[in-house]
Image: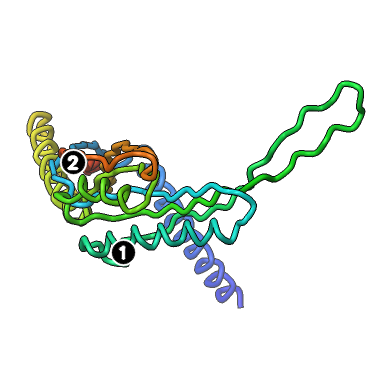
Amino acid sequence: MQDKIKNILMISLAVSFLVFAFSAAFWVSGTLQLRDPVRTFAVSAEGKIVAIPDIAEFNYAVITEGGKDLASLQVENTNRSNRINSYLKEQGIVEKDLKTISYNISPRYQHFPCPIDQRVCPPSEIVGYTVTHSVRVKVRDLAKVGELLSGVVTAGANSTSGLTFSIDDLETIQGQARDIAIQKAKNKAKDIADSAGVKLGRIVSINEGFVTPFKLREFAVPDALHAPAPMSPVIEPGDQKVRVTISIVYEIK
């Protein structure tokens, strides 16, 4: 009986020793990892592509002012807007590239002076309304931008604004700039590693940033009903620089 108890005690002590040994080894391993982190370094580079815009957009507005007969003002405004849209479609602008961005009806008030000898001032009175219909136009043939800006005025618009240029397939251009940035970052990392006498390990992380090109031109015209037909302006879209920055973190072997 005593021999059996001794055997049990010996086995228990052996198991306890093994558990303690494994725990100590795990703690030492974790401590060493904390004290000796993975060595890394980061490099960054920029890729740039100079591209020519192939899309133009501008706003036109039909502003109709009149008296209290709001229904007739709306009919007049609608007729002028429809005439402009018909002109644009005749010039090759498809329906999906015409977008109404606002339609507003605003009252116009007559304000009366407040007599000094009266405590109650006369209320303002509505004397008419203003109807404004604004449309965004996308032009895919840049050679026609100047002609269209003048043409919408002749057709009935009395305000144009917000002329911008952009790149239709921007993702493809960004991809080309990204490839350039990544290759430049890799070359820089190799040069740094060679100079420092170390070897590049695996890539730990990659971060990307890019600048979206945007160009704005302001173009305004007088009321088409009170001015002669304007000459078509010369529109120059220029170029746009698409930039992508890449940051790569490498492990040092």
108, 170: nearer the viewer: 108
200, 233: nearer the viewer: 233
| Callout 2 amino acid | Pro
In this rendering, is residue 52 above or below 138? above
Q: Residue at x 22, y 43 (%)?
A: 244
43, 150: nearer the viewer: 150
In this rendering, is residue 46 above or below 68? above
Q: Position of residue 125 (x, y in %)?
A: 74, 42
* Relative horizontal placement of residue 180, taking residue 105 as reference (left or right): left
Task: Identify the image quadrant of residue 216.
Answer: top left
Q: Which residue is mark 2?
A: 237
Q: Residue at x 53, y 52 (%)?
A: 131
Q: Secondary structure at mark 2?
A: loop
Q: Identify the residue at the far top of this view.
A: 116
Q: Residue at x 58, y 61 (%)?
A: 71
Q: Can residue 118 be seen in this snapshot?
A: yes
First in sequence: mark 2 or mark 1?
1
* Relative horizontal placement of residue 190, taking residue 230 as reference (left or right): left
Q: Position of residue 164 (x, y in %)?
A: 29, 44
Q: Position of residue 89 (x, y in %)?
A: 26, 64
* Relative horizontal placement of residue 220, taking residue 132 as reference (left or right): left
Q: Which residue is mark 1?
A: 86
| Callout 1 amino acid | Ser
* Relative horizontal placement of residue 103, taking residue 249 as reference (left or right): right
Which image quarter is the N terminus in? bottom right
